[in-house]
Image: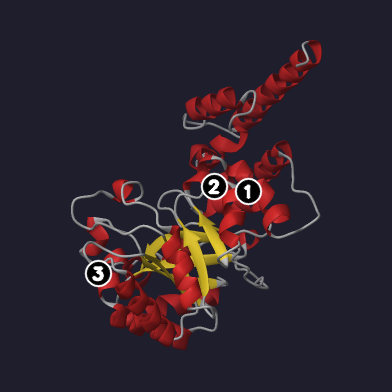
Amino acid sequence: MTNIDSPKPLNRKFCIAPMLDWTDRHYRYFARLISRNAVLYTEMITTGALVHGDRDRYLQFNHQESPLAVQLGGSNPDELAACAKMAEDLGYNEVNLNVGCPSDRVQNNMIGACLMAHPELVAECVSNMQRSVSIPVTVKHRIGIDEKDSYEELHHFVKTISEAGCSTFIVHARKAILQGLSPKENREIPPLKYDVAYQLKRDFPSLEIIVNGGIKTINESLSHLDQLDGVMVGREAYQNPWLLSQVDQKIYGEQESTLTRQQVLEAMIPYIEEEMSKGAYLGHITRHILGIFHSMPGGRKFRRHLSENAHKPGASIEVLKQALAIVTSERAAAVETQAAFPQ
């Protein structure tokens, strides 16, 4: 396992949300090539998987992914403390506790959004983790669950956990409906209420409040940053990853430009070759880069070529090189057409 040698300081102005089956280490390596500053989060990892399973498989990462946070799912204070220590020892920059996932499976194990009904238990979990590590311990949560969705209840939740020592709260600005809605529906049906996150910041000005949910553009992010300390973007950062190319300059104020799309893919090639030499399948990595030419000439052919060929037995890095050649040719043809028929 590769550890981060010298952890970078965390600036959570722009974060990429933990997303099950999506924000694995291959996606995170890819995302880091596009943005140097965005804070990346792992998929949620349950304490049971680390305590009783293959710790190295779940916590493996590349040092270039830093700044990187691990998201844990659990409700046993001692197990969470042990897992937080594992993460710190391996070089993670932050430990985040999931108090937002609404799925039946995690509810049955007292993981995720159901914990919002138990603020004292969450506070105990946070306190135990903080005693075990020196890196930040943060909480990601909803604005309410089921009928426990008043602002007073949310205020009590945040106050209780903050008094246990947590100073960073990532607020998914929707309530969770634990009975009757699927996790997908819980991301779409309950209305977004950004004003609730804004009110939390006004009521707790010393806390770092980061908003999550439905954010799709850099301009939206900047608007939230007028009121809050940070934003967390989920599906848009995955499906349209080139959004991240604006983050370093527009969010963090850097002058240095990012890599081009082609440069990003060329930088992925040696990484993919190394991972494949260790037994990784091409399609398990290239599935994360399908959207890099989103809405660009040749983007659809690029996606199709990778989708149809990367999972074939024996697929090699040549599949990606061919896809890159296809999109390069399509873009060149589009430039020629534009020159011949200017608007």
Tag 1 secondary structure:
helix
* Mark 3 or mark 1, whichever is nearer to me: 1
Residue 200 seen in the current view: yes
Tag 3 secondary structure:
loop
Report the side of 296 relative to 207 (left or right).
Answer: right
Do the residues under discs 3 and 1 have CB atoms within 8 angstroms?
Answer: no
Do the residues under discs 1 and 2 have CB atoms within 8 angstroms?
Answer: yes
Q: Position of residue 2 (x, y in %)?
A: 59, 64
What amino acid type should be assigned to the residue bearing mark 3? Met
> Who comes first in sequence, dot 3 or dot 2?
3
Mark 3 lies on residue: 110
Mark 1 lies on residue: 244
Measuring 66% from the left and 60% from the top, which residue is drawn there? 37
Do the residues under discs 3 and 2 have CB atoms within 8 angstroms?
Answer: no
Which quadrant of the figure has residue 174?
bottom left
Q: How many neighbours does mark 1 have within 10 angstroms: few (below 14), some (14-19), or many (20 or more)?
A: many
Disc sitting over residue 237 in the figure: 2
Q: Position of residue 113 (x, y in %)?
A: 30, 64
What amino acid type should be assigned to the residue bearing mark 1? Leu
> Who comes first in sequence, dot 1 or dot 2?
2
* Mark 3 or mark 2, whichever is nearer to me: 2
Which quadrant of the figure has residue 273?
top right
Disc 3 and disc 1: Cα gap in Å? Answer: 34 Å
Measuring 28% from the left and 65% from the top, which residue is drawn there? 149
Q: Is residue 188 above or below residue 57?
A: above
Q: Nearer the viewer, residue 49 or 103?
A: 103
